[in-house]
Image (cartoon, rainbow, N blue to C red):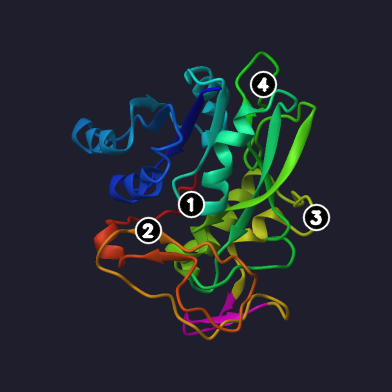
């Protein structure tokens, strides 16, 4: 069966290209949607990441465009990714086998929030467990309601995957930007609970801010890791397959990020 990779994003073209490049060997097409408010020259930069490039009208949140975006995909399966999500090597190798199955309509993909650096991930509510209905059969059963923090409605039979994707959101924003993003979402869907409990909108605040603007740990069981992610001036993203939560130390990070200047990052407060 054929696979489309779909990404609606506002994140910079260089970053998105780096994140999607690894999917070339398994994807039959990569479909990229960018905000119609981008200028023509800026939007054209995304062609480096895509087989097909679309522009969509951003209204409130990108979920409002998801039904339309999936309908533009030609593959029998669609893997949705945001512009700050990285597929793990384990999931990458499993994709051909997963989409070949005829007894499953949807897969819930495990998403791991990397923090405080690329060496570990948060393993407490609301960040874990975090399963997203990101890999779906592209047929008439597919339906979306368009609200923030939603994905495709469940259609059975469905399966839950242990092969993860890595979420870079907390690594790409400052504490002040995370607070601003949380306030935006709280205004849209206040009190929304994560599947395992805890506020979804607290996703963006794993730490509290001191009066001087620096960060301090808010929870008692969040991932604690003294290792710092290695910074590389080369490729924007590199992935290691060792995915144990909160390891005491790593030879290499799960995801290796270039400096922000090399990624060309802009403020991500606008939120996919």
- Front in this rendered view, residue 168 or 55: 168
Residue 237: which disc?
2
Give the structural element (helix, strand or loop) at label 2: strand
Q: Nearer the viewer, mark 2 or mark 3?
A: 2
Image marks 2 and 1: residues in contact by CB distance under 8 Å: yes
Residue at the (51%, 21%) spot, across then down = 75
Q: Residue 70: x, y in percent?
A: 53, 23
- The residue pinned by badge 4 equals 142
Image quadrant containing the N terminus: top right
C-alpha separation, residue under disc 4 versus residue under disc 2: 31 Å
Let me know if residue 216 is in the magenta part: yes
Q: Earlier in the sequence, mark 2 or mark 3?
A: 3
Asked if the residue under mark 3 is in contact with the one under mark 1, i.e. CB atoms within 8 Å, the reply is no
Q: Does the magenta stretch include residue 6?
A: no
Report helix, strand or loop for mark 4.
Answer: loop
Image quarter of residue 129: bottom right
Depth check, front residue: 252 or 208? 252
Mark sitting on residue 196: 3
Image vertical order of residue 202 relative to residue 29, above or below? below
Q: Mark 1 points at which residue?
A: 86
> What stretch of residues is rendered in magenta?
208-218
Mark 1 or mark 3: whose residue is earlier in sequence: 1
Q: How far apart are marks 2 and 3 (CA)?
A: 29 Å
């Amino acid at each position: 069966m054929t696979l489309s990779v779909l990404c609606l994003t506002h994140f910079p073209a260089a970053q998105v290209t780096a994140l999607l490049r690894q999917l070339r060997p398994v994807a039959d097409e990569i479909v990229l949607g960018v905000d119609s408010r981008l200028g023509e020259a800026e939007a054209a930069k995304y062609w480096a990441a895509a087989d097909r490039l679309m522009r969509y009208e951003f209204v409130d949140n990108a979920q409002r465009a998801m039904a339309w975006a999936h309908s533009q995909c030609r593959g029998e399966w669609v893997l949705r990714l945001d512009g700050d999500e990285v597929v793990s090597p384990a999931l990458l190798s499993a994709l051909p086998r997963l989409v070949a199955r005829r007894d499953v309509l949807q897969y819930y993909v495990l998403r791991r929030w990397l923090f405080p650096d690329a060496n570990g991930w948060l393993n407490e509510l609301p960040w874990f467990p975090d399963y997203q209905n990101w890999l779906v059969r592209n047929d008439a059963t597919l339906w979306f309601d368009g609200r923030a923090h939603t994905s495709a409605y469940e259609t059975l039979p469905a399966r839950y995957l242990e092969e993860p994707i890595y979420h870079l959101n907390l690594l790409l924003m400052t504490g002040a930007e995370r607070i601003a993003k949380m306030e935006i979402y709280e205004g849209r869907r206040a009190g929304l609970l994560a599947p395992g409990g805890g506020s979804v909108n607290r996703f963006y605040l794993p730490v509290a801010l001191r009066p001087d603007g620096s960060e301090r740990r808010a929870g008692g069981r969040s991932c604690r890791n003294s290792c710092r992610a290695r910074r590389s001036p080369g490729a924007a993203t590199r992935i290691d397959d060792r995915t144990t939560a909160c390891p005491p130390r790593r030879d290499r990070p799960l995801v290796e990020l270039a400096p922000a200047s090399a990624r060309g990052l802009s403020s991500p407060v606008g939120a996919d």
